[in-house]
Image: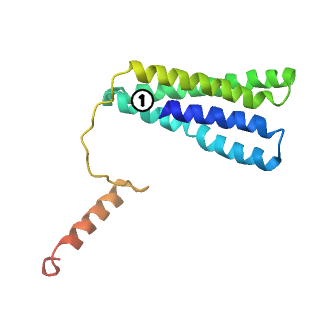
Amino acid sequence: MLAAVCAGAALAALAALGATYWSVAALVASMFLYGGLAFSVYPVSVAFVNDRLAREHALAGSSGLLLVYGVGAVIGPAFVGSAMEALGPRTLPVFFAVVLTAMAGFAYYRLRKAPEAPEAPHTKFVPMMRTSAAALQMVAGGEQDEAAPAGER
């Protein structure tokens, strides 16, 4: 899935490059597609890592991903800014396509080399509310009261 998302985003970036010669509507549509795919690369990466790490290594894995993401967020704009100054504004989608193609290739390579993710036991989904633990206990208590017959409340 990660390789497909990266490859799709790379193709959308190349479509945006071509759209710069056609029309503004085509450019907006291709950049909309690019954004939808490119902004899902990091969450899909986190899910991929968390599927393959033991629970006790999840924090270290997420920290490593965040560090790599941060380094790329610092180096990438500086590099592509210099390239755009030298080669023109159409360098930006080319840069996106090259980086995402490299990521797709690496993800595909790792997918072929890495063992399958272990099958996790299925559990019931429990939504977490944005509130305190005391309020969560009150809600849990209210659900139990509603489940009890009318005479036992």
Q: Residue at x 24, y 40 (%)?
A: 121
Question: Height in image: 126 above or below 144?
Answer: above
Q: Toward the viewer: 13 or 58?
A: 13
Label 1: how many Cα within 10 Å (few below 14, some 14–19, many 20+): some
Q: Quadrant of the C terminus?
A: bottom left
Spot the residue most to the bottom: 151
> Percent position (x, y) of residue 83?
80, 21
**Secondary structure category for the residue under label 1:** helix
Q: Please state if 127 lies on the left or on the right of 140 as rendered.
A: right
Residue closer to the observer: 125 or 8:
8
Residue in the image at 84% along x and 38% along y: 21
Can residue 68 be seen here? Answer: no
Q: Residue furthest left?
A: 152
Residue at left offset 48%, top offset 24%: 108
Judge whether 132 appears above or below 18 on screen. Answer: below
Q: Is residue 25 among what the camera can see?
A: yes
Q: Nearer the viewer, residue 76 or 16?
A: 16
Above or below residue 152? Residue 52 is: above
Color theme of the render: rainbow
Residue bearing mark 1: 49
Task: Name the residue located 67 percent from the left edge and 24 percent from the top edge.
Answer: 98
Vertical relation: 75 (above or below) 121? above
Can you give x and y, in whole percent of width and height, for residue 138 in the image? 30, 63
Q: Nearer the viewer, residue 74 or 19?
A: 19
